[in-house]
Amino acid sequence: MKIPTRPFAFLLLSAGLLAAAVNARSQGNVKPLPPLPSVKQAEWHDMEFYLFAHFGPNTFTNLEWGKGTEQEEVFNPTDLDCRQWCRIAKAAGAKGIIITAKHHDGFCLWPSKFSDHTVARSKWKDGKGDVLRELSKACREFGLKMGIYLSPWDRNHPKYGTPGYNEVFINMMKEVVARYGPFFEFWWDGANGEGPDGKKMVYDWTRFKATLRTIAPFTVVFSDIGPDIHWVGNESGIAGKTNWALLDTAGFQPGAGAPPTDTLNRGNENGRVWLPAESDVSIRPGWFYHQEEDDKVKTPEQLFQLYLKSVGRNSCLLLNVPPDRTGHFTSFDSTALMGFKELRDKSFAYSFAKKPGTVISTALPSNTKNLSDNDAETYISLGPDYKKNAIEIKLRHPEIVNCVVLKEPIRMGQRVKGVTIETIGENGNTTYTLDATTIGHKRILTFPKQLVSAIRIRITDSKAIPLLGDVDVYKIDDELVEKD
Ligand code: FUL
C-alpha cells in the first residue's frame, strides 16, 4: 500500500478520499489515524540528519552569548567559504544546513534594512559581504536544503522590549525569506536570558506564525512547541526511548512557557497535534567555535550513539558544526563527520531481511515484500488480532546479528505503543527478548549480538491496527551497540 506524498494527494488524504485509503480498506479496512503529518512535516522527517552552523561575532570574541554591544568590525572571517561547508555536509550525508542568521547578540549575517548591527557595518569585504547570500548559493550548488535560525531575543536592537520590535522581527523574517529562501526550516529560539531586571518583551507569536504561513508555506517552523516541529527538551541530541510525534500545545508558549522538558522529550501519546521532536546538539561542547575545544570534538562513535538516540528514536538529528574564524569548518570537525558517515554506511549497508533466501512471513496472508522495499510508505497491516500475528524473518543460514530497524508508515499516523523482538537460535528456541515502546518514522534497536536462524517481531500494544512499513536486520560493530 502506498501513500502519495505530493501536496495534492495530501489534500485528498485530509478529505478522506485518497486512493491509498481505498487500498488500505481493501486490505483490512485500515484508515489513517489522525493527527497526521502535513506533507512538509513528513518530508522533514525523511531528511533525518542535517547540520547547524553557529557563526557570528561570538566566533571572534570567544563567547557563547554575545552581549549585543560588540563592534561590528569584530566580525571578520579571513576566508569565508560556504562551499567548503556544503562540500563537507554533503560528504557527511547531511541533507541541509541551518545557519544562525541572527543570534542573541542581534548581529545580522546579512545586510538587513531593519538593523544597524549587520555585516554591512563590518570591515569584512568592506561591508559588502553577505553570509546568507553565499550560503544559499552554495546550498543550491551542492543540492542541500537551507534553513534559518533567527533569535527572537535580541540584545542589541533598540526596539527590543517594545511592541515595535515585533514589527522588526516580522520584517526581518520577510526579508530573509524574500532574499535567500526558500528554506526547509525556520528556527525560533526560545532562549531569553534577560533575567528579572531585563527588558520584558511580549512576542507576538501569533503574527510571527501567520507571517511565515503566508510567505513560506512549505517551510517547517521550529520552536519549543512548534508549530511544525518541537524542541526535544535537551541540547544533547537525545530523544526519549518512547517518543510520540504528537504533542499538546494548547496553553503553552515557546521559551519559559513551554511544556516540561520530559514531555518535550517523549511527546504525548494522545497529543492533539502532529508535532515531532528535533534533536539538536553540537559536535563540540560549545555552539560557537572556540579554539580550545579543537580537541573536544565528538568522535565518530559518539556521533553514532547520538544518531541511534535521535534518528533511531523517531526524531531528526540537527548537528551543529561551527565555522572557525577563517570561515571554514575545521579539519577536526570534518574528520569526525567523515568517520561518522563511514560508521553509518558500514553498519547499514546490508540488511539480512533483504538477503536472497530470507523469508519474511506473518500469520495473516500479507504482502511482506512491502517490508523489504526500502519504502516505509508501502506497508503491511497486522490486523486487529495483531498480538497473535508475529512477523517472522527466517534467514537462510544462521547469522550473527545485533540490530533491528523498524519503520511505521507515519503518513497513516503513529500507532505502535509496544513491540517485542525475539531472536531465535539454531535449535528454534528464543535466545534473546527485547521490549521497546514507540516506533514512528524510524526505530533502531540494538542488543548484544546473537547467532540467529530467525527474528520475530511482535507488536504488543497499539493505538489502532498496527502497520509496519520496513523491517531490517543488521550486524553492526559490537562497540556501536547503543549505550545508556
Ligand atoms: C539555545 C541558545 O541559547 C544557544 O546559544 C544555541 O543557539 C542553542 C541552539 O539554542 O537556546
Image (cartoon, rainbow, N blue to C red):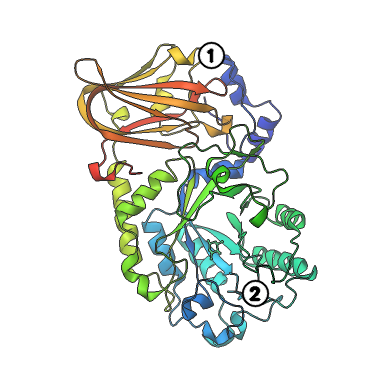
Residue 222 against residue 78 in the figure, above or below: above
Say which element carries label 1.
loop
- Residue that sits furthest to the front in the current view: 196
Q: Nearer the viewer, mark 2 or mark 1?
A: 2
- Residue at figure coordinates x 69%, y 71% from the top left: 197
Q: Are marks 2 and 1 in contact (CB under 8 Å)?
A: no
- Residue at figure coordinates x 70%, y 56% from the top left: 212
Please give left or right for residue 366 compared with residue 35 in the image.
left
Name the residue tied to disc 1.
384
Under mark 1, the amino acid is Pro
Q: Nearer the viewer, residue 394 or 140?
A: 394
- Residue at figure coordinates x 60%, y 76% from the top left: 107
Q: Is residue 465 visible?
A: yes
Q: State which tag comes first along the sequence, 2 or 1.
A: 2
- Residue 266 appears at what percent x and percent y? 53, 40
Identify the image quadrant of the C terminus: top left
Tally of marks = 2
Q: Which mark is residue 82?
A: none
Please give left or right for residue 158 compared with residue 218 in the image.
right
Name the residue tied to disc 2.
155
Q: Nearer the viewer, residue 22 or 351?
A: 351
Please give left or right for residue 60 compared with residue 445 in the image.
right
